[in-house]
Amino acid sequence: MLYSLTKPLAKIALSAYFRKINISNQERIPAGKPVILAVNHPTAFIDPCFLACWLEPPLNFLARGDFYVNNPAIRKLYNYYHIVPVFRIDDTGYGGLKNNYDTFDKCYENLRKNQPVLILAEGRCVHEKRLRPLMKGTARIVFGTLERHPDLDLHVVPVGVNYTDPDAFRSDVMIDFGEPIRVQDYLETHRNNPAKAVNALTADLRTRLAERVIHIEQPEDDAYVEQLLTLRRNNRPVRLFPSFSTDPQPLFGEKKLVDEINRLSADAKTALKAKAAKYFGELKKAKVTDRGLMDHTSYSFGSALLLGLGWIPYMAGYMLNILPILLGNRLAKKLAKTVEFRASIAIFASMAFYLIYWLILLVTAFIIGKVWLIAITVGIPLLGQYPHSDTVLDADDILDIPAQRVLLAPAQHPQCHL
């Protein structure tokens, strides 16, 4: 009941917090079949929230069980939201592992009833653009289910979740569903050699998941690759509406760029890193942003006039929207011990505060009864949001774009200065 009641509210809140939500190839989920959604795990608990909000059937989630053990309130929330606790040695010690028998039984029963189960296949969340090794728990639940119910036509669907920046308000999320893995194809191998079947399924799942996750192979490349991704985003069409899309291009455009960088030689990476550093260094010295530089041709009297006229509603929107965001960030800094949880708590708390805050404003407007006040209150989330840039660059262009843009000589475009 609580799941159904809060789902539309969470959907609205996620749409307000994130600028663009791209969920593609959802039709690959086999209709009428028992399904395990195997998802990567870049944030603590926002990833499952997206899937719960945009998938029609209620999902059953596997989540860490140490919160569940000693807190009656958390146990009730787990039950309300179909969360099945998983007990790990690091969290509960060896004594807690026996509780996983009940966890597996619940998963087997949910799948028997054709109720989808969501598993965070990496096991632990790490805040990075990288697919980490998969745990074997997904495969073990799969084959445990078939041992109980051998006739089930069970499928595992890889789901890649990617963020432009999960810490940032009004960033983008890109989710893509891969081709399902039919588990019956591994059943004969499992009968003869269970360990081999577990390893094979885990390896195949990782291969398919890797096809839809942005993966920077070397951690030392993270900083300059993010700079190159920034260049690409500043040349990608970004329109305010619709905020939701089923277009896979934003994800696979960024993934193509990262994959090409991964294939470069060490010398080529060093040269590219130097170009990016030079370009962004020039921007900093000139007090210019890359977005401003690339939009310099659109600066005119007309656009300046529109910008001036838009400044008042923008500032009004900023002032009216900033309070719940500040409260959420403050709470996250106080409660979270790691950046992975800090981002998730900030998003979750900000969304909760924002919903409460906006509903209070809306109710107040209706009580006052002024139509113009109601209209302004309804439009508060939209104030200050502007579309930009209508051109697209391919990965091949981005790989050389620092050199191209440095040649533009930012100092020659004072109209772009901040």
Image (cartoon, rainbow, N blue to C red):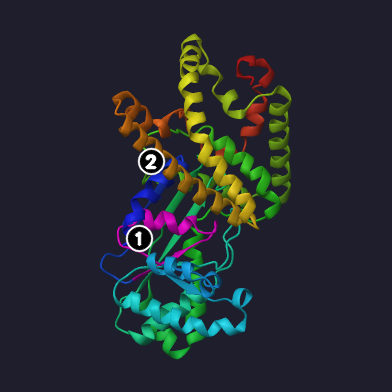
Instruction: Report how far apart the C-alphas of labels 2 and 1 lie in the structure.
Output: 20 Å
Q: Relative to the observer, which residue lies in front, 312 or 104?
A: 312
Residue 85 appears in the picture as rendered: yes
Residue 128 in percent (x, y) is at 61, 54
* Tag 1 secondary structure: helix
State left or right for residue 380 relative to residue 260: left
Quadrant assignment, res 144: bottom left
Say left or right for 404 vs 161: right
| Res 336 → quadrant | bottom right
Helix or strand or loop: what does disc 2 sit on? helix
Q: Which residue is mark 2?
A: 359
Q: Is residue 153 magenta?
A: no
Reply above or below: 70 against 404.
Answer: below
Q: Which residues are magenta?
A: 35-60
User: Which quadrant of the figure contains the N terminus?
Assistant: bottom left
Which residue is located at x 37 percent, y 79 percent? 108
Where does residue 110 sit, x and y in percent of width and height? 34, 75
Farthest residue to the top: give it: 301
**Quadrant, the C terminus:** top right
Residue carrying label 1:
3
Res 105 quadrant in image: bottom left
Please state which of residues 40 and 224 is positioned toward the viewer in this rendering: 40
| Residue type at numbered disc 2 | Leu
Q: Nearer the viewer, mark 2 or mark 1?
A: 2
